[in-house]
Image (cartoon, grey):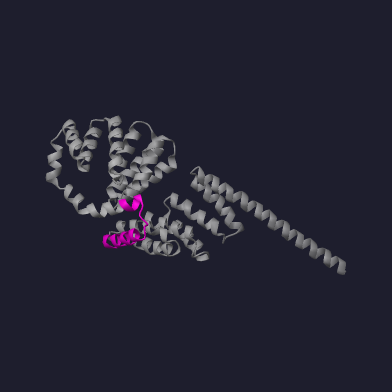
């Protein structure tokens, strides 16, 4: 009798181990399938695989993180925030989770909350102050941005991106003045050849803007590409130049190059929803031409949201 009970206990224990091993194997299979589907931008399929993972382990941080990332790609902001909050409840000091929460909040243009979250990240990693500067600017907290830049420069933490933020803040009022109607009219009365002669002497950014605008109207896309590329060497922080360079690349059928340029340049867009929408529209065109339907739709939706 005792031998029988021992045999049953051992058998049950062995069964339990086999079930755990089987579940672990299934979990790994589903999880890697989710990663594969996300890599090819098939976010809905990735979510389906993650749901199978969740049936096995509903409190796995990696699964919750992946749920949030895929929902963010689909612009499902409520779900993206819900899952990242569940992950953070389990690992509140995980820097990568915190950074993703900032990305979710930024996508919703909730810069106030994103700033508070970024401050938590800075406590864990002081080098992340650069993103905090950008968030201050996006939230129009210009004084706070300037103060933080000064502190970072004192601590020898300056970067090319930080310098671009400083240039933006230093020139913000001047740029606004340059957009006044009288000055625009003066340039708009000049043809491309005259504009280029003036630009060769002054190297004034506003003139280059007008040159590129006129070249685009005349569908001189090769020249738009060349001129915007050259101008970026002088004005690497100006998002308009990246936009026009990406626009020209799209017109020339160089869609992968356009995506690279536009993805880089959009980080320099500050406090300008219309221009940000232009970037997303060009990215949508690039992906559409490459057959990336889901990515094209995502960027079209982002552009539309900014225009509301």
Q: Where, by quadrant of the figure, is residue 221 drawn?
A: top left
The answer to whether residue 49 is left or right of residue 282 is: right
Residue 83 is situated, as x and y percent measured from the top left of the image, at: 49, 59
Mark count: 0
Q: Residue at x 66, y 55 (%)?
A: 23
Residue at 29% of width from left, 39% of height from top?
244
On whether residue 148 falls in the magenta region, the answer is yes
Quarter assignment of residue 15: bottom right
Q: Characterize the magenta stretch by its predominant secondary structure.
A: helix
Please name the residue shown 60% across and 50% down the image: 30
Q: Which residues are magenta?
A: 142-163
Which of the two residues, 172 or 85, is positioned nearer the viewer here? 172
Between 107 and 93, the one lying in front of the other is 93
Left or right: residue 214 versus residue 23 is: left
Specify whether residue 33 is painted magenta: no
Q: Taking 255 as reference, is 238 above or below it?
A: below
Residue at 24% from the left image edge and 33% from the top image edge: 215
Q: Pinpoint residue 56: horizontal percent, then vertical percent.
A: 61, 57
Residue 140 lies, in percent from the top left, at 27, 59
For residue 183, side relative to residue 152 (left or right):
left
């Amino acid at each position: 009798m005792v031998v029988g009970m021992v045999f049953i206990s051992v058998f049950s224990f062995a069964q339990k181990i086999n079930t755990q091993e089987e579940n672990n194997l299934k979990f790994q299979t589903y999880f890697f399938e989710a990663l594969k589907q996300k890599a090819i931008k098939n976010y809905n399929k990735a979510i389906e695989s993650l749901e199978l993972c969740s049936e096995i382990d509903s409190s796995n941080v990696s699964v919750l993180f992946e749920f949030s990332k895929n929902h963010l790609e689909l612009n499902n902001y409520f779900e993206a925030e819900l899952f990242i909050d569940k992950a953070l409840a389990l690992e509140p000091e995980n820097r990568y989770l915190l950074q993703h929460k900032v990305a979710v909040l930024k996508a919703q243009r909730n810069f106030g909350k994103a700033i508070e979250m970024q401050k938590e990240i800075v406590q864990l990693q002081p080098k992340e102050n650069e993103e905090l500067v950008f968030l201050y600017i996006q939230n129009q907290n210009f004084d706070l941005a300037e103060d933080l830049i000064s502190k970072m420069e004192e601590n020898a933490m300056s970067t090319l991106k930080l310098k671009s933020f400083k240039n933006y803040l230093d020139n913000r009022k001047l740029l606004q003045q340059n957009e006044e109607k009288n000055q625009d009219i003066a340039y708009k009365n000049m043809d491309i050849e005259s504009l280029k002669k003036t630009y060769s002497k002054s190297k004034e950014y506003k003139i280059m803007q007008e040159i590129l605008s006129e070249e685009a109207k005349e569908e001189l896309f090769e020249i738009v590409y060349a001129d915007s590329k050259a101008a970026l060497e002088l004005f690497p922080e100006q998002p308009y130049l990246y936009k026009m360079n990406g626009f020209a690349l799209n017109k020339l059928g160089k869609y992968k190059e356009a995506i690279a340029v536009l993805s880089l340049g959009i980080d320099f867009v500050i406090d300008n929803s219309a221009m940000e929408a232009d970037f997303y529209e060009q990215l949508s065109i690039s992906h559409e031409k490459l057959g990336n339907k889901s990515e094209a739709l995502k960027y079209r939706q982002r552009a539309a949201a900014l225009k509301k």
